[in-house]
Amino acid sequence: MKKEKIYRVFSHLPELTTERLTLRRMMVADTEDMYEYACRLDVTKYLVWYPHPDRDYTREYLQYLGGRYAAGMFYDWAVIYEPDCKMVGTCGFTSFNCSSDSAEVGYVLNPEYWGKGIATEALTRVLEFGFDQLKLHRIEAKFIKENERSRRVMEKVGMTFEGVMREAMLVKGKHLDIGICSILRSEWKDKNKKVID
């Protein structure tokens, strides 16, 4: 996979849909919905970023993303829960290893919507896009060891737990153990019983 393809695809971020969700680019209009969860300590406890201090910070972040999208250098979708017409989190790719046809995915969800299968539904759609449209060979996801909720989402979509990398990331001043799960293209095809070549 070539970097040029990544830039081309993500500079015109395609909208993805599922039964209950729309995945689209983040916009400044999402400020209130994003701030609602991004300001919470229970959301950022297992993430690499700190809570947003105020709505202005969230708005400026979303404005910044407009340029990143235009350059094809941001690979994350806003997760819109259609029954409530509300942005409830994000899901997408965090990085690509073009020489290995692989990528890493990540997601975050408003706690008010935990337990509804939304993260699983969104991640399944992103994996489908990665294997079908981007022709990836491997997709992985990482989690801070204590975040079992996140690991369960990964396993629900068919990812295999590979192990823990000891003190592999410096997060908020501490070296933390990081778990990793992954799924291969062949496993995805078997799981979904459809040809995606």
Image (cartoon, rainbow, N blue to C red):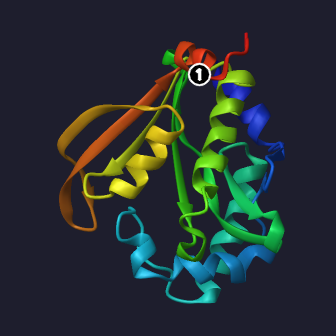
**Residue drawn at (54%, 64%) of the image:** 115
Residue placed most toward the observer, 153 or 141: 153
Question: Would residue 74 be visible to someone looking at this image?
Answer: no
Q: Is residue 197 above or below residue 24?
A: above
Image-quadrant location for residue 140: top left
Which residue carries the number 1 mark?
Answer: 191
Local packing at callout 1 (Cα closer than 10 Å; few below 14, some 14-19, many 20+) is few
Image-quadrant location for residue 123: top right
**Where residue 108 sits: x, y (%)?**
53, 61
Number of numbered tags placed on the structure image: 1
Q: Is residue 42 above or below residue 159?
A: below
Q: Is residue 186 above or below residue 179?
A: above
Q: Is residue 77 left or right of residue 92?
A: right
Q: Is residue 111 above or below residue 129?
A: below
**Residue drawn at (72%, 42%) of the image:** 72
**Residue drawn at (40%, 77%) of the image:** 42
Disc 1, SS: helix
Q: Is residue 137 left or right of residue 30?
A: left
Q: Quadrant of the N terminus?
A: top right
**Where residue 99 sits: x, y (%)?**
51, 17
Q: Is residue 146 left or right of residue 184?
A: left
Question: Would residue 189 be visible to someone looking at this image?
Answer: yes
Residue placed most toward the observer, 177 or 95: 177
**Where residue 103 sits: x, y (%)?**
52, 31
Residue placed most toward the observer, 114 or 5: 114
Q: Quadrant of the C terminus?
A: top right
Amino acid type, label 1: Lys
**Where residue 185 sits: x, y (%)?**
57, 17
Q: Is residue 10 left or right of residue 51?
A: right
**Residue drawn at (66%, 22%) of the image:** 192
